[in-house]
Amino acid sequence: MKLSRKAAWGLLVLLLLLLLLGTQMPGAWRDEAFRVSHLPWQMTKVAHCVVFAAMTCLARVAPLRWPVALVLAAALAMALLTEGLQHFAANRDPSWLDVGIDMAGAALGLLLALLAQAGRARF
């Protein structure tokens, strides 16, 4: 599947908005969603990892093709911003562990982009 540059930017902006909205979700809502989901892991941690992986992969591959340093800098800035914004959300606290989870997602996204590019080179 080939995305246009406009569609890639639109998807990247959508992921950023979802990330920012999720970050501002009150802690009570987050806790209730976790309670009713009966998942063995915390949804928000997995969601952050997945969203950061998707954003970095999307930014790294065609048609955007951002340099790795820019992708990592943008991911770190977003991780720090989203954690900092949690000071303003009800019953939420920023966490360095969450910044690490976000950056692990970013690293996963870069790996996926590398694999996607290597797969394309073969064909």
Image (spheres, helix red, strand yellow):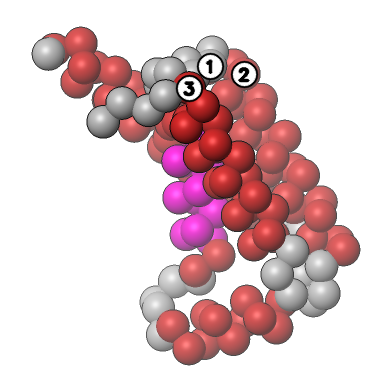
Name the amino acid, label 3: Arg
- C-alpha separation, residue under disc 1 versus residue under disc 3: 12 Å
Q: Are marks 2 and 1 in contact (CB under 8 Å)?
A: yes
The residue under the point 82% across, 67% down is: 89
For residue 5, side relative to residue 117 (left or right)? right
- C-alpha separation, residue under disc 2 versus residue under disc 1: 6 Å
Relative to 16, residue 30 above or below: below
Residue 29 image offset from top left, x and y in percent? 66, 81
- C-alpha separation, residue under disc 3 versus residue under disc 2: 17 Å
> Badge 3 local density, few (<14 within 10 Å), some, or many (20+)?
few
Q: Residue furthest right?
A: 88
Read off the residue under disc 2.
70
The residue under the point 47% across, 32% down is: 7
Which segment did they paint magenta?
45-55
For residue 93, side relative to residue 54 (left or right)? right
Quadrant of image for the N terminus: top left
Numbered circle sitting on residue 66: 1
The kind of secondary structure the magenta stretch mainly shows is helix
